[in-house]
Image (cartoon, rainbow, N blue to C red):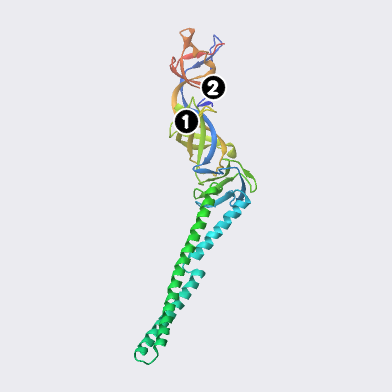
Amino acid sequence: MKKLLLTAGIAILATACKEKIPVYTVQQRTLNEAVYASGEIMPQAYYFLKSNSADLLLQVKVKEGDAVNRDQVLAVLGTPSQLTQSDILHRQVALAGSNAEDGSATLNELKERIEQARQKYEADNLNAARYTDLAKDKAVAEKDAEQTRLEAANSLHTYRSLQQQYLAQKNALADKLLQTREQLAANNQVREGKVLKSPVDGSVFKVYLKEGELAPLNDPVMMIGLPGKFKLELLVDERDISKIKTGQKVYFETDVYAGKQFAATINKIIPVLQKESRSFQVEAAVLDSNAFYPQSSVEANIIIRENIRALMIPADYLLKGDSVYLQQGKEWRKTHITTHTKSGEWVEITGGLHAGDIIAKKE
């Protein structure tokens, strides 16, 4: 990473008449100190949907730019036979659920038979009671009365038998529904990670694969996020991370909008060193409302100090070991100084020089 020092104003170099060497009068100047960082611009909230195993991408149900709802199925992975089996199980569950409802055709048929049996029993029971009374009065033979009572008993048995049959059938249909649901749940567990659903109400930013392509393990299939707001994911060199604080301004550029500068604010510092790059990741909320493109590369300056007054000298006046030739009376003496921020053209001085001192650039 490189550190940028932005200064306001242009140095005026004078030439000593006698010694014919360039000299410079030390003075205060306005400067902005910044730390360079690079990275990507991303949605403020985003998710990579991945497969939990290497599988074929069977179905892609959305395209880039589509608005999606939470838990909406976006893609299906696996083999065609697995997809067919899943469809069959879903249909079986739907059918079993329909059969188990109180108003299903199977149960309604039994209800009608039960109602007919109830009516027949009530009629037979009434007839048996009438014949029994007539037999007491010797109006009919006892044998006929006994026959009507037997018919009433048979009707009652049929009525109760149909009621028990109804309960048994209802329980059997409920068990069938439970079994199919368990089979579907087991299938879903096996296929967990193969049916990709949206975790949020948002938009599809990127679809990385096409139907029929192999989705490698843990590789993203698509990126989902919340539209409208963006953030920067930046890498800061480990030597500069101590200077970074939340709330600092960030000015950045992206090739998508070449030559245009945008603003952001540091809002998160992830305190874990990335060993490969020897850098830390920081995040910054983008303040502009432009339509940015996720994963576009950015280059940024994180402002450490802004519009401050400091003693400055041209960098080419500084000697090795942080010293300069300082005019003392009529002589030039090599004097050690203390520096702070350096860039290609300017050096900030924190000790050893004062405003108005004159220094020379000698070979």
Q: x%, y% of residue 344?
A: 55, 22
* Residue type (three-letter) at the residue carrying disc 2: Glu
Of labels 2 and 1, the one closer to you: 1
Mark 2–mark 1 distance (CA, rounded to whole Å): 33 Å
Compared to residue 352, the image places residue 343 above or below, namely below
| Pick the front one: 238 or 296 | 238
Looking at the image, tell me whether mark 2 or mark 1 is earlier in sequence order: 1
Residue drawn at point x = 44 percent, y = 71 percent = 163
- The label shown at residue 80 is none
Would you identify the image quadrant in which residue 141 lies? bottom left
Percent coordinates x, y for residue 14 in the rendering: 53, 16
Q: Is residue 149 above or below residue 208?
A: below
Choose between 207 and 317: the one closer to the eye: 207
Tag 2, which secondary structure?
loop
What's the mark number on residue 272? 1
Q: Residues within 10 Å of mark 1 (few under 14, many from 20)?
A: few
Where residue 136 sits: x, y (%)?
Answer: 34, 89
**Number of on-image labels:** 2
Q: Residues within 10 Å of mark 2 (few under 14, many from 20)?
A: few
View extreme (bottom): residue: 139
Quadrant of the image containing the N terminus: top right
Amino acid type indicated by mark 1: Val
Q: Position of residue 51 (x, y in %)?
A: 57, 44
Q: In which quadrant of the rendered image does the C terminus lie?
A: top right
Element under disc 1: strand
Q: To which residue does mark 2 refer?
A: 345
Give the residue at x 59% y 54%: 85
